[in-house]
Image (tube, rainbow, N blue to C red):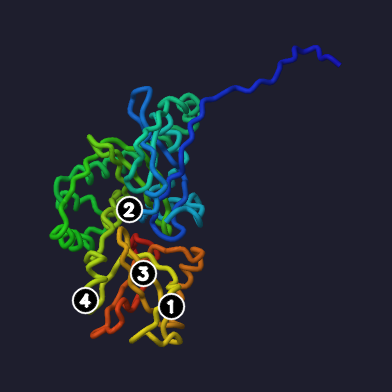
Amino acid sequence: MPSGKDEKEAKLRVVEEVTHSEEVLRLGENEVEEVARVEVAPPPELTTRLATEEAEFERRTHEPDIDVIIDDARESEDLEDDWQETSTRGPVPYGWFVLIFLAIGGAVAWSAGWFSDEPEVVPADLARQESVERMAEDEAEIREATELVEMVEARVRQYADADSWEGMLPHVRDRSRVEPLMRRWYREEDFEPMPFGRLLVFQPLELDARNFFIVRYEVKKSNEAKSLLVEDCGDEGVFVDWETDVCYQPMPWDRYVEERPEGVLQFRVQVEPDYAGLYSHEFQDESRWLAIRLTALDSDEFLVGYVERRGKVEEEIRTLIEDNQYRPVSVVLRLRVPANVKSLRGVVIEEVVSNRWLIQEEK
């Protein structure tokens, strides 16, 4: 029966849609989830989004990299739970970061620094109108979140614009521990400035109840982008993780494989089962040793790490591998080359220093 009220035909409103590929920081096992991806663009109405290739996300901790640094989100945790619980500041609702940056403008993404040749054109004002009304819900929260983002961006800019490793040092996390590593690293490696152009991605991340940010920025006057991991240290400020930035090793992995100097060294490696079953020489007793294949970033060389069965270290490594469904796991290991070793590729795994490529000292 016809209604006395005017009937209105339901219509669909067409909204321009932009699809963004998922980005991942490789930091280690089960550590990354897209929590609050925020994208930034300069004032012009149109900006270009540098599209990343999926292969780049296998690069860093690697991690995130990173991750570097930087694992992917195949077994990601809910990183929004209890976010900021260890910060000395009051909790900041990180959903506001999305609204803040949508209001500023938007485009681009994370992982380690490689891009496709064809930029994707993104309307900078696409989501701005829809977010403005929601922005007014709590001005205090918006202001607090904005200040935190600005503080992180300022720290990254200072770190990136440094013209020497000494200039980077005040902006590095765990400075007292890391300074000797930087000094040693830059005796052999050239310092390469990567000046800050503009912020591309800001992503909150929680690791072991501590607050971090994945920050990706466009390198000034180049078609490159760089990703960094930044820790929020509460009242002390925010600081960049240099070790995952360069994927620090005490010596080049290829040289370590070739020379295998006697003694103990700490390496960022990926571990997986040694399906070849290389039990020989000092490590031929399979009832005593478990063989683990060890590889490193940007290298085709491998070693076989042997861990004593029925011990704490074996249990840790087994758990990491099983939890990751027997795929390579990013870890930091303490490796020992025995005196007068006969095994061609054998080293002893003495300790799992970290279950990702990021090292966190107890506070």
Q: Nearer the viewer, residue 315 or 80?
A: 315
Q: CA distance from mark 3 to mark 2?
A: 33 Å
How many numbered discs sit on the rendered protein?
Answer: 4
Q: Which residue is mark 4?
A: 261
Which residue is at a point 36% across and 55% down the rendered structure image? 62
Dot 3 or dot 4: first in sequence order is: 4
Which residue is at a point 39% across and 86% down the rendered structure image? 284
Drawn side of residue 35 relative to residue 305, left or right: right
Q: Are marks 4 and 2 in contact (CB under 8 Å)?
A: no
Seen in the picture, residue 221 relative to 15 is either above or below; the reply is: below
Q: CA distance from mark 3 to mark 1?
A: 13 Å
Q: Which residue is mark 2?
A: 233
Q: Which part of the image, by quadrant, shows the N terminus? A: top right
Dot 4 or dot 1: first in sequence order is: 4
- The amino acid type, in three-letter code, at marker 2 is Cys
Dot 4 or dot 2: first in sequence order is: 2
- The amino acid type, in three-letter code, at marker 1 is Gly
Q: Which residue is mark 3?
A: 294
Q: Neighbour class for label 3 at 10 Å: few (<14), some, many (≥20)?
A: many
Which residue is at a point 31% across and 82% down the rendered structure image? 343
Q: CA distance from mark 3 to mark 4?
A: 16 Å
Dot 3 or dot 2: first in sequence order is: 2
Where is residue 358? Give x, y as percent: 34, 60
Which residue is at a point 42% across and 47% down the rendered structure image? 54
Dot label at residue 277: 1
- The amino acid type, in three-letter code, at marker 4 is Pro
Drawn side of residue 93 relative to residue 302, left or right: right
Residue 64 visible from this viewpoint = no
Seen in the picture, residue 349 relative to 362 is either above or below; the reply is: below
Dot label at residue 219: none
